[in-house]
Amino acid sequence: MKKRAYLFVWSVFILALATTSSAGQFQPRNNAKEYILHDSKPAGTSIKGWENDSYPLGNGYFGVSFFGGIEKELWQFTEPSVVVYSYQQRKKSHRVELSSAIELWLETDHDSKKASDYTRQLDINRGIGLTTYKSGSVTYTREQLTSYPDNCFAAKLTASQRGKISFRLNSKHSYPDYHRTIQASVDGDQIVLTGTTEPMKVTYQARITVDIEGGKMTNSAVIGEGIIEVSGADSATIYATIETNYRLEPKTFSTAAGFWVIGGEEGIPPAYVAKEDKLKGNPLPVQEIKDRLEKARSAGWDTLRKRHVADVFQYMKRCQIDLGGIRPSTPTKELLRGENRPEAAKRYLEELYFQFGRYLMVSSSRTGTLPAGLQGIWNWNMNAPWSGGFWFNINFQMNYWPVFNTNLEEFIHPYLDLLKATFPRHQQIAKEFAKEWGGKDIDDAWTVGTGNTPYDNGPPGSSGGVGSGPFLLYALWDWYQFTGDEKVLKELWPFLLSSSRFLVSVMKEMPDGKILCNPSWSPELPLGQGYETFGTAYDQQLVYEGHKMTLTAAKILGKQDPLLETLRDHIRRLDPVIIGDSGQIKEFREEKDYGSLGGKDHRHISQLIGLVPGTVITQKPEWVEAARKTINFRGDQSTGWALAHRLNAWTRVYDGERSLALLNVLLADKTFNNLWCKHPPFQIDGNFGGTAGIAEMLLQSHRQNETGYIIHLLPAIPGAWKEGSFFGMRARGGFEVNCSWASGKLKMAEIKSLNGNLCTIQYGDRLIELKLKEGEVKRISF
């Protein structure tokens, strides 16, 4: 203790000599390094080609995948509320799953075998897709975007010679024969696709139009398909938009999504009808859709593109990392798989992957939209894997891990909107669960289960125990921790109090005085038919985190409630971390040696939820060491998102070499050519978790001391990252941080206070205590 105190004082004294304050040094970069995915071939127009090679565009309202074809280009649209019926044979259950909405097929007379100079690109700094090639003596270019400000898709087609733009644009419904009714019509010069999917009776409408310079154009509609033919134009611009009658509101979730199965006898096909029309009374905003398309069209391509680029770039430039990467000329897929790559190319791939995760967030989770699901907002399947919904045992939470530390605070709003819309239904689930499992009749309680869609919510169970409630609230708690905004805390308070009330109702006092969850599960690790356990690490650690959040929020907001005294008593008796005979953190209380119960190499590392994203394990060095052993036992081979979780866990035990090793495995083995994460199949949480893990290698701020949050610089930096910098990262306590290093040593850090809090800067064993005024910047040289 004396040595540490001496080191602290000496570090503060020496490093304070090298600090300067400024109100004007902290400026965002206007010029960001170019981050571009590119390929020398089109993506195949199959599910495999979509998943492996297509490039994603999105605006939160809908996602578009483009393939870059020559004879045929495909723009495939996903609207996240468009779901269809699905029967799960393994579970003998009926459910609804995300389905592709519409497809725009562009057909030309160009021969791909004779084309040359082909390239397909996605500029993630700007959200612009590009396809260009040469056919004969003419160079053809297609630029495409999906705009949030204008809520539309647009594509500009040009040629190096006048009069060379000719094509047929077929606008189609996806999977028209599978639980949907469809129609197509012409409204003036707009193609209109209208469809209704069963059994939720989701009605959607897409409108498509084309403007040309020179040439001729005709429109028609036949058998559920719209056709626009263009010949001899100098250029053409395609505009499209789509919307449904879905509303994110409590009524949509008021009851479970049950189904009546009608028919199915010999010669009579079965019909699947929802027991309740959850969208009844929701009109399809036809005039709004029509006006939106006309407004975008009136603005024109140049204005639309300018607004879109300004929107995307403002977020992408906010936070940057530079590991010394240099963009290579090789296609992205070769950069992923190639051997003997130059170090500068490896570093560029790591930077690109970091920013790609941020790009996916900007493209899939915007104010006024649904949040990002298991596939974000991109799906060409008839039935998306695992419903394409919101999985609350880690996957949905992981989607939002990089939101705050990589400076994308605005994109958390759909997460909160979903929780608010589902609050009454989750209260009903809590009441039913407490009655069924504990015989208790409680009110004003709240909980969540794993499987959720835009229409339905499930209870806790073997795929995710009662701790999933506080786990879901952790992202909103981070929102408060990163910003200090008490308005956020006031929004969160009803959830925290109701969650803790539910948890108290399903916990039991053991003979030794411990308070344990009963029933209790560790996600997706059922221990056999009829086997019941209690007090799993997953549930106990998350109950601890939840009660801690509730008690802290009550103190900050000055709240009083009789439940708080119970929480103060229980939190001391939760026993959230137990070390087993192998030195591991036990997943189950009955466990002895590592792997004696559960799965030795299971994808979930639920016993380490208190390490990341939680903090309870970080309270004691022996717990951190046990966590290190546990991650090592679990191994480095798993599904995509699970590797991302392991990566984040290694950063929290400050092992830069192992963190980089996990990142390399994630990139080499669990990443498709288009950088989507490979579960497999495609699942977007691994992308977001990977971006968060890279950020945690460079900056961590989850620990606190008596003065405030500890901003730990370069806590898990590997030797391969010898020099570099980052800009615009966020730290808890309301701070923004810049940093640079060379020869593996920190050179400079800039700390900007957003609300005037105290903090401690840590680099290695050195500590610097800072108190800055709101808006003040401190530069520290090392």
Image (cartoon, grey):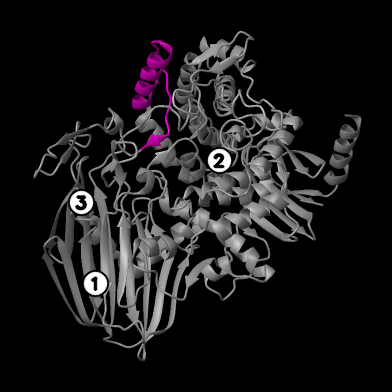
Q: Tell which tag, 1 or 3, sits nearer the viewer.
A: 3
> Counting residues from the N terminus, which is met first, the one under dot 3 or under dot 2?
3
Classify mark 2: helix, strand or loop.
Answer: loop
Distance from Cα at disc 3 to Cα at disc 2:
36 Å
> Badge 3: how crowded within 10 Å, few (<14), some, or many (20+)?
few
* Residue displayed at 46% across by 45% down: 411
Q: Which residue has dot 3 on it? A: 178
Q: Which residue is mark 1?
A: 211
What residue is drawn where x is 85% and y is 37%? Answer: 8
Is tag 1's residue or tag 3's residue first in the polypeptide sequence? 3
Looking at the rendering, the stretch of residues picked out in magenta corresponds to 424-452
Between residues 260 and 296, which one lies in front from this camera angle? 260
Mark 2 surroundings within 10 Å by alpha-carbon count, few (fewer than 14), some (14 through 19), many (20 or more): some
- Residue named by callout 2: 602
Tag 1: Cα neighbours inside 10 Å, few (<14), some, or many (≥20)? Answer: some
Q: Amino acid at mark 3?
A: Tyr
Closest to the observer: 322 or 438?
438
Amino acid type indicated by mark 1: Asp
Residue 671 position in % (x across, y down): 52, 58
Quadrant position of residue 450: top left
